[in-house]
Image (cartoon, rainbow, N blue to C red):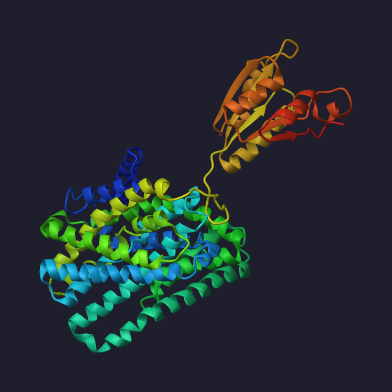
Amino acid sequence: MLLGILIILAVGFVLGELSGRLGLPKLIGMLFGGVLIGPHVLDILTEPIYNVSDEIRLFVLLVILFKAGLGLDKEKLMAQGTVALRLGFIPCILETFVVAAATRWLLGWGWLYSFLLGWIICAASPAVIVPMMLKLKSEGWGAKKGIPDLVLAGGTLSDAVAVTMFGITTAWIIGNGQNTLLQLGNIPVKIIMGLALGYAAGRLVLFVIEKVKLRGEVIPELIISLGMGILLLVGEGYLPYSDYLAIMVMGFVILELDTVLARRLRGEVDKVWQVGEIFLFVLIGAVVDIGVVSSTGFIGIAIIGIGLIVGRTLGIWVSTWRSMLNIKERLFMIIGQSPKATVQAAIGGIPLSLGIMHGEYILAIAVLSIIITAPLGAFGTAYFTPKFLNKGEVDPTKVTVKEDYRFLVAVDGSPVSSKALKEAARIARQVDAELVIVNIFNKVDKKLSSERIERELLIVRDLDHEFLMYEGDCADLIIETAISYDVDYLYMGKTGGSSGEDTLLGKVSKEVVERSPIPVILVEDDTDD
């Protein structure tokens, strides 16, 4: 087990980074890594990993769906009216009908088997779509109209429809067709129950955190939230509801009722996801059987392509008709909802395991849809985003905004400048910032001795830092250095001066404050009178 975990992390990380450096989404490298180390190529994963791979994928999917819920923008979704609801039904239904027609025409299968394949193929992949859309949200792409939110909401609803209809069609094929109408009624029931239980779970998470007095303890908060998500996953086996939808709604409810908690949870979930995505995509790649896939040939590719190009395109075009979206944005929606992976990996092998006719080919086409659409959808989203979407203002209350901070600290060996350095270092540790430490001297003020520099730098030995020494005009050089290093904040001590305002700020500090285009933080020595 440990060896298998090491192999997954090493291969997924290395190939993901290589893919990123080639300008491709990292998940493409991770998927390829899974194919490479899987049972049908090198076969170097250990058996215990395969025994728990479904559970691992499911848990990581829980993490990313919860993360998506913590970032949904209610105002943007409401501004689009019923578009998100239409996106949850129309594209997947039309794609299924087109796939079924193409399958019957190209392979000659019966209608029931053709529709069974259609319901497997039509589902969009939350494992691929959610991280891509959250990345766009964090960068502001499509932010004004909430396009990533529409893709997230519509994709999750469509999965509930696809999985439910797959179950109905499977039951009909194996002889329980008499319950078809009852099972059809499960679609709205699953959606309504998913919404209700997701809401209840979100409220319960908040209640438990407050009741046990764990507010502000981020790790217990995370454990309680993910634990509730696991209960939603397990409960789906006993009650008719969409667990994917319920988990996303739980995150959304926490966001709406406690934005402070939601912000903390987003930060911690991001850390879990950085490791989880490697397991998710490598394990999805590991289920790919190249031999079986090759047996479907161009016919399988044609069925998948016709379903996407005709069915999904028409479905999204109809769903976004008379909406606020322009043509380019609607084209982006088609690309954004095209990746397939999670549902296909989860249910693609069920017909074969049940002995249903054409089961081997159904699995092969399902796997082929992962190989084709996951990389192409990820690459297409990354490539067309700047061409089809406008970049708007990022809402930091809905996403975790990753920022790299750099502070400049001016030191001269005085106690107050040392205090400014200590304060800058304290804040830098909290936000993992880099420090630029500057000692500027002139003919009057001597430069710091090497011994004094060593003592000063002990304060920041655990931080990334750079020490600079210049001779010349202090205020000019401080400002020029701050601009050239693109620092976010400038720390100085309140020093020098003879009277009045100069005594309070100091001549150099006062001049920098007046002229600097960068925010200046002045630290006062408590011993000063």
In the image, residue 318 sits, relative to residue 426, either above or below, namely below
Horizontal relation, residue 344 to residue 498: left or right: left
Q: Dividing the image into 4 quarters, which one contains the N terminus?
A: bottom left
Q: Residue at x 48, y 56 (%)?
A: 269
Q: Nearer the viewer, residue 123 or 336?
A: 336
Q: Position of residue 122 (x, y in %)?
A: 28, 66
From this viewpoint, is residue 122 visible? yes
* 482 left or right of 6 in image: right
| Residue 302 screen position, x and y as percent | 17, 59
- Residue 261 in the image, given as x and y percentages of width and height: 59, 60
Instruction: Locate residue 527: give its quadrant.
Output: top right
Q: Position of residue 477 (x, y in %)?
A: 66, 20
At a point 19% along the width and 62% down the height, the residue shown is 303
Q: Quadrant of residue 56?
A: bottom left
Visible residue check, residue 1: no
Q: Where's the C terminus, which quadrant?
A: top right
- Image vertical order of residue 229 relative to residue 512, above or below: below
Question: Residue at point 68% right, 21% down?
Answer: 476
Q: Seen in the image, is 154 located left or right of residue 38?
A: right
With respect to residue 151, does 404 lie above or below? above
